[in-house]
């Protein structure tokens, strides 16, 4: 008889909301700090570990920013990409759409295309080793404003043929009105990119409505506060707009007081399409198998419901129908 942990480990899985930079574990961060002799390196190894012990969402954003500052060359991106994809493959993640913080690269004054070559090199090595399939989402930071977002979108379009499948926006959703970015999203869509947006994480359901109306987002990252608006939940169900749910993330960033208050079960009861994701697994001390286990332990999801979640993650992916069917056949 399989334990639930064994069952989860053997499930074929896809991850759709995963920040590359948030996969960098303390050991890897220390390698980068040592490589570049950063201020963190001068503070000592304990400072690297301490960075992961933040208290709230602002602290998390600061930790994420510091980690990003340690990615300085294409070789750095190659290292973290290969390590990340190996870890995913060990969890039987067959497919991933990984968010690259292109907006942060530009903020650091770096060449996005050069860094992306490093990412592709790491991916090529990991794919040869494990068979994992990846597409990439270029992410603009809302707080950097629409002009910066335009540059990210143009870089994403230029790299479509190299596996960039979508454009999205993250950062602090409480900064700047969604309408400021409407034309950027329209242009990205007209140039063949798929669209996603962080919304309903630290702001109310109106942020999700804005992402749908202003961005025409095809998926919503987090969507936690949708549960506060019955008409929004009904709309998401009717239009089959997936939510990228991140349980540990919402707890660790302090947007949830406790996991039991997460609306995962209610979302499923309302027939929403849900994918489970880790968001920033190194920063949140989790992995995708653990997220499935949390869904079982905290919301009573049985093996069939967990299997349906795994299938939904492939169904919500930005993949051609034939590829989706091939992955779903593995169930």
Image (cartoon, rainbow, N blue to C red):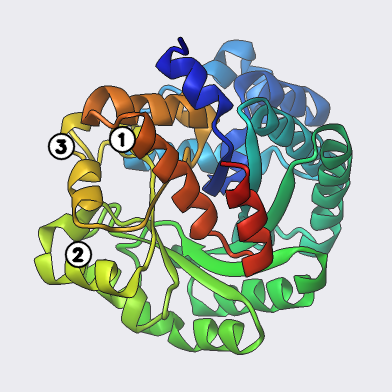
Question: Where residue 178 sits: x, y (%)?
Answer: 35, 77
Most foreground residue, 58 or 300: 300
- The residue indicated by pointer 2 is 233
Of labels 1 and 2, the one closer to you: 2
Sequence-earlier tag: 1 or 2: 1
Of labels 3 and 1, the one closer to you: 3
Q: Residue at x 32, y 75 (%)?
A: 239
Q: Which quadrant would residue 126 be assigned to in this image?
A: top right
Asked whether residue 322 is in view, the answer is yes
Sequence-earlier tag: 3 or 2: 2
- The residue indicated by pointer 3 is 261
Q: Are marks 3 and 1 in contact (CB under 8 Å)?
A: no
Above or below, 262 relative to 236:
above
- The residue indicated by pointer 1 is 56
Gap between marks 3 and 1 measured at Cα: 17 Å
Q: Is mark 3 on a helix, strand or loop?
A: helix
Question: Where residue 153 sits: x, y (%)?
Answer: 63, 76
Asked whether residue 102 is in view, the answer is no
Q: In which quarter of the image is the N terminus?
A: top left
Gap between marks 1 and 2 measured at Cα: 27 Å
Residue 236 shown left or right of residue 21 in the figure: left
Q: Quadrant of the C terminus?
A: top right
Q: Which residue is drawn at 71% across and 77% down?
A: 157
Above or below, 240 relative to 3:
below
Residue 216 shown left or right of residue 158 in the figure: left
Above or below, 16 relative to 184:
above
């Amino acid at each position: 008889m399989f334990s639930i942990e064994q069952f989860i480990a053997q499930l074929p899985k896809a991850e759709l909301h995963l920040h590359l930079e948030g996969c960098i574990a303390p050991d890897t961060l220390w390698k980068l700090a040592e490589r570049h002799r950063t201020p963190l390196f001068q503070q000592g190894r304990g400072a690297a570990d301490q960075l992961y012990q933040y208290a709230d969402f602002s602290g998390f954003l600061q930790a994420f920013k510091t980690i990003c500052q340690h990615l300085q060359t294409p070789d750095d991106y190659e290292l973290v990409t290969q390590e990340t994809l190996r870890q995913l493959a060990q969890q039987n993640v067959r497919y991933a759409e990984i968010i690259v913080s292109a907006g942060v690269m530009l903020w650091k004054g770096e060449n996005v295309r050069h860094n992306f070559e490093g990412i592709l090199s790491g991916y090529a090595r990991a794919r040869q080793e494990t068979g994992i399939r990846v597409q990439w989402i270029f992410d603009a930071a809302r707080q950097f404003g629409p002009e910066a977002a335009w540059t990210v979108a143009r870089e994403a379009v230029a790299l479509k043929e190299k596996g960039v499948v979508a454009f999205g926006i993250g950062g602090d959703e409480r900064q700047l009105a969604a309408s400021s970015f409407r034309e950027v999203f329209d242009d990205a869509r007209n140039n063949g990119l798929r669209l996603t947006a962080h919304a309903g994480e630290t702001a109310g359901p109106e942020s999700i409505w804005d992402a749908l109306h202003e961005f025409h987002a095809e998926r919503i990252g987090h969507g936690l506060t949708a549960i506060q608006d019955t008409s929004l939940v009904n709309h998401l169900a009717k239009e089959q707009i997936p939510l990228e749910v991140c349980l540990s993330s919402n707890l660790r960033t302090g947007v949830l007081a406790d996991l039991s208050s997460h609306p995962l079960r209610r979302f499923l009861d309302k027939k929403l399409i849900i994918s489970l994701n880790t968001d920033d697994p190194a920063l949140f001390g989790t992995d995708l198998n653990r997220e499935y286990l949390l869904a079982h332990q905290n919301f009573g999801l049985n093996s069939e419901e967990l299997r349906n979640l795994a299938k939904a993650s492939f169904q919500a992916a930005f993949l051609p129908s034939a590829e989706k069917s091939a992955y779903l056949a593995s169930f």
